[in-house]
C-alpha cells in the first residue's frame, strides 16, 4: 500500500531537471553546498536561492512537497539557530547599536550572533531544499548509477565501488518497504491499545519498543532472504557487468554544469571581493 | 454492535501523482451476530475498509468533507460515531479486535505471557492484579488451543509458525472484543492449520464474540463458514448476500477474477450434464444433496 511519505520520494513528472544526468545533479549538489557555505553576504545567498528557485520551478515538483520535506528538519533548524543566537561571541557592529545587545550570565546576544543565525537558517533550508530536489527528480536506481560512475576512479586503489553502490541501492530500495512495515506494525500495536498516538511523552516513548522489536526482526529476516536470493542467482560484482540504462552527457547537462561552475566561481569572487562589506 | 458504513470514500496520497482511490462511495451494513466474509481481488479496498472499523483509518475532518460534493458519509460501529473527531477510539478499539495479515509479525515481548498480556494491560482502566492477568491470559491462550504451561515462559520467536499465529491471535482476543476483524487469518498456514484457525473462530463466535468479520481469498473457507459475504471491487461493494446466493453467480465472479469454491465448481459441472443440485455450497450439504440425488435415480 502507498503511504503519505513525503521525504525524499521520487516525484514522477517529465522535466528538464528530471532528464539531467544524475552525475551532474550530484556534482551540482556538492558544488551548491560548498557555494552556500562560501557565501558571506546576503546578496550572495540571494543569488544562490534564486538559482535554486529557478531549478525548482523548472523541475515541476510542487512547492508543498518541498515544504513538506523541510518540516523534517524544522526542529534542527530552530535548535541550532537558538543556540547560535544565545551564545555566539562576536563584536562586529552592523547597525547603529552596541555590539552586545543583551547579556545575562552565559547568555549573550550580539549583533553578529543575530546575523550569523539568520545566515545559518537560510543555509540549512537551501541545503535541504537542494538535496530533496535531487531525490525528488532522480530515481534511486539512477542515483546509485551516478554515484558508482563518479566513484569509479577509486577502483584504482582497490576500493569496492560496485559493492558500495549496491549497498546504497539496497538501502534506498528498502526505505519504502520498511516504512510500510513500520506502519503495519504500528497499526497492529495501536489496535492492541498501545499509546502511540495518545498519552504523554513518557508513555509514547515506552510504546516504541513494541514497534522497534518486530521491525528489527523483520529487517534481519528480509536481509537474510535477500542475501540468499542473490547468492542463488550467483550474484557477484563481476567486472563485465553491463547496464540497462547507460548514462549520457547531453547539452542539458553541459548547461547545468556551467551554471554550477558559474555559481561556484561567483561565490569565490564575492567572498574575497565583497560587494557590500557586511 | 452493528456496523453501518454509507458513502465512504478513501483516497491514498490525494492530490499527488500517486493518488489511488481505495474506497469509492462504499456502503455496507454488518448486523450483530453475523459471521461476515469479505472477498475481492488485491487492491479492491478490503484492507482499507476493515482498518476503518476500529479507527486505524480516520475520516478527514468534517470541514474538509463538507467542501466536497456528494452524500453525507456515515460510519457507525455500535454506539461509536466514527465520523466525529471526539469519538473515544480507545474504547472502540477495546470492543473491536483486529487481527492483521500475518499477525505473528507483531510479536515483540520476551515471553508469550507478556505479549498476550500487552493488550489487556493497555486497555485496563486500572492496573490489573497479577491473579487477574494470569487468569485472562491463560483463558486467551487456552482458547486458541495452545498449551498454557508450556508456552507461557517461551519466547514467542521460538514457537513454530502455526503456534506464533495462535499466540498473536491470543494477544488480540485477550480483551474479549465484541467484534473480531481478521485479515486473511489463515494465509500461509498448512491445510490443517487453516482448519484449526477457522474452527477457533467458530468457537469464539458462538461464545462471547458476537460478530466476526473475515477477509479472505480462500473461497472454500468463505463458503464453509460465513453467513453473509460482501464482494469488493474497485472500492465498491458489488454484492452482499449469503454464500448460498452468491456462489450461484459463478460466471460473474470468475469474470471479476475471483475464484469460486470447489463445491460451486462441481455444481456447475453437474448442472451442465443435466444434474442440478441446490445446495448451500458447504461440503457437507453438497455431499448430502448429491447422495440424495444419486439415491433417487439409478446411474
Image (cartoon, helix red, strand yellow):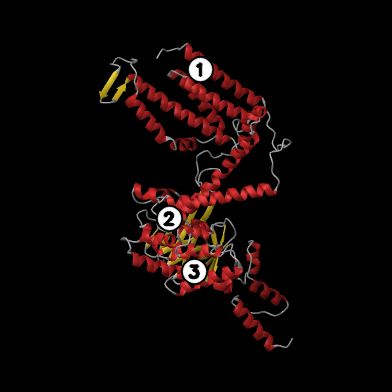
Alpha-carbon span between mark 3 and mark 1:
71 Å
The numbered mark 2 sits on a residue in which chain? A
Q: Is residue B6 left or right of residue B18?
A: left
Can residue A28 be seen here? The reply is: yes
Residue A236 coordinates in the image, percent (x, y):
69, 41
Q: Quadrant of residue B77?
A: bottom left
Q: Earlier in the sequence, mark 2 or mark 1?
A: 2
Residue A64 coordinates in the image, percent (x, y):
47, 37
Callout 3: 10 Å neighbours few (<14), some, many (20+)?
A: some
C-beta proximity under 8 Å, tags 3 and 2: no
Q: Is residue B128 above or below residue A265?
A: below
Do marks 3 and 1 share a subunit?
A: no
Can residue A1 be seen here? The reply is: no
Alpha-carbon span between mark 3 and mark 2:
25 Å
Residue A155 coordinates in the image, percent (x, y):
66, 29
Q: Is residue A245 left or right of residue A276?
A: right
What residue is shown with label 2? A190
C-beta proximity under 8 Å, tags 2 and 1: no
What residue is shown with label 3? B146
Residue A225 coordinates in the image, percent (x, y):
61, 51
The numbered mark 3 sits on a residue in which chain? B
| Residue that protrudes farthest toward the left in the picture | A104
Callout 2: 10 Å neighbours few (<14), some, many (20+)?
A: many
Q: Secondary structure at mark 2?
A: helix
Q: Tell which tag, 3 or 1, sits nearer the viewer.
A: 3
Residues B90 and B243: in front is B90
Q: Quadrant of the C terminus of chain A?
A: top left
Do marks 3 and 2 share a subunit?
A: no
Q: Secondary structure at mark 3?
A: loop
Amino acid at each position: 500500500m502507498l503511504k503519505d511519505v513525503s521525504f525524499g520520494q521520487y516525484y514522477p513528472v517529465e522535466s528538464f531537471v528530471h532528464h539531467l544526468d544524475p552525475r551532474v545533479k550530484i556534482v551540482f549538489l556538492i558544488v551548491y553546498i560548498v557555494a552556500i557555505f562560501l557565501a558571506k553576504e546576503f546578496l550572495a545567498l540571494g543569488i544562490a536561492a534564486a538559482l535554486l528557485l529557478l531549478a525548482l520551478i523548472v523541475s515541476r515538483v510542487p512547492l508543498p512537497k518541498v515544504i513538506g520535506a523541510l518540516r523534517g528538519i524544522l526542529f534542527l533548524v530552530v535548535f541550532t539557530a537558538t543556540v547560535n543566537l544565545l551564545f555566539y561571541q562576536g563584536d562586529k557592529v552592523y547597525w547603529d547599536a552596541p555590539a552586545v545587545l543583551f547579556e545575562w550570565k552565559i547568555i549573550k546576544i550580539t549583533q553578529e550572533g543575530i546575523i550569523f543565525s539568520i545566515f545559518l537558517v537560510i543555509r540549512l533550508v537551501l541545503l535541504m531544499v537542494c538535496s530533496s530536489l535531487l531525490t525528488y527528480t532522480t530515481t534511486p536506481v539512477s542515483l546509485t548509477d551516478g554515484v558508482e560512475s563518479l566513484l569509479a576512479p577509486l577502483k584504482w586503489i582497490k576500493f569496492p565501488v560496485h559493492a558500495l553502490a549496491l549497498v546504497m541501492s539496497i538501502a534506498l530500495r528498502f526505505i519504502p518497504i520498511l516504512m510500510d512495515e513500520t506502519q503495519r506494525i504500528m497499526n497492529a500495536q495501536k489496535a492492541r491499545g498501545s499509546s502511540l498516538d495518545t498519552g504523554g511523552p513518557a508513555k509514547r516513548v515506552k510504546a516504541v519498543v513494541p514497534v522497534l522489536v518486530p521491525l528489527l526482526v523483520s529487517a534481519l529476516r528480509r536481509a537474510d532472504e535477500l542475501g540468499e536470493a542473490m547468492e542463488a542467482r550467483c550474484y557477484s560484482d563481476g567486472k563485465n557487468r553491463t547496464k540497462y540504462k547507460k548514462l549520457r552527457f547531453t547539452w542539458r547537462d553541459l548547461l547545468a554544469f556551467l551554471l554550477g561552475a558559474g555559481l561556484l566561481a561567483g561565490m569565490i569572487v564575492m567572498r574575497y571581493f565583497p560587494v557590500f562589506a557586511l | 454492535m452493528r456496523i453501518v458504513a454509507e458513502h465512504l470514500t478513501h483516497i491514498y496520497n490525494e492530490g499527488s501523482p500517486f493518488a489511488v482511490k481505495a474506497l469509492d462511495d462504499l456502503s455496507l451494513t454488518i448486523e450483530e451476530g453475523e459471521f461476515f466474509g469479505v472477498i475481492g481481488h488485491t487492491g479492491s479496498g478490503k484492507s482499507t475498509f476493515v482498518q476503518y472499523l476500529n479507527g486505524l483509518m480516520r475520516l478527514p475532518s468534517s470541514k474538509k468533507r463538507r467542501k466536497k460534493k456528494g452524500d453525507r458519509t456515515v460510519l457507525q460501529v455500535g454506539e461509536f460515531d466514527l465520523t466525529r473527531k471526539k469519538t473515544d477510539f480507545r474504547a472502540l478499539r477495546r470492543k473491536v479486535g483486529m487481527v492483521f495479515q500475518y499477525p505473528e509479525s507483531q510479536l515483540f515481548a520476551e515471553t508469550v505471557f507478556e505479549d498476550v498480556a500487552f493488550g489487556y494491560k493497555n486497555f485496563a482502566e486500572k492496573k490489573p492484579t497479577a491473579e487477574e492477568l494470569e487468569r485472562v491470559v491463560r483463558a486467551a491462550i487456552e482458547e486458541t488451543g495452545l498449551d498454557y504451561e508450556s508456552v507461557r515462559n517461551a519466547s514467542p520467536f521460538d514457537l513454530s509458525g502455526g503456534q506464533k499465529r495462535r499466540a498473536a491471535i491470543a494477544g488480540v482476543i485477550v480483551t474479549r472484543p465484541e467484534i473480531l476483524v481478521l485479515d486473511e487469518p489463515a494465509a500461509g498456514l498448512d491445510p490443517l492449520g487453516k482448519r484449526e484457525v477457522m474452527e477457533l473462530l467458530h468457537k469464539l463466535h458462538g461464545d462471547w464474540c458476537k460478530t466476526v468479520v473475515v477477509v479472505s481469498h480462500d473461497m472454500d473457507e468463505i463458503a464453509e463458514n460465513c453467513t453473509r459475504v460482501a464482494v469488493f471491487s474497485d472500492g465498491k461493494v458489488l454484492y452482499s448476500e449469503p454464500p448460498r446466493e452468491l456462489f450461484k453467480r459463478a460466471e460473474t465472479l470468475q469474470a471479476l477474477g475471483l475464484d469460486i469454491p470447489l463445491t460451486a465448481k462441481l455444481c456447475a459441472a453437474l448442472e451442465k450434464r443435466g444434474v442440478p443440485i441446490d445446495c448451500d455450497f458447504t461440503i457437507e450439504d453438497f455431499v448430502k444433496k448429491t447422495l440424495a440425488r444419486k439415491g433417487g435415480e439409478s446411474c
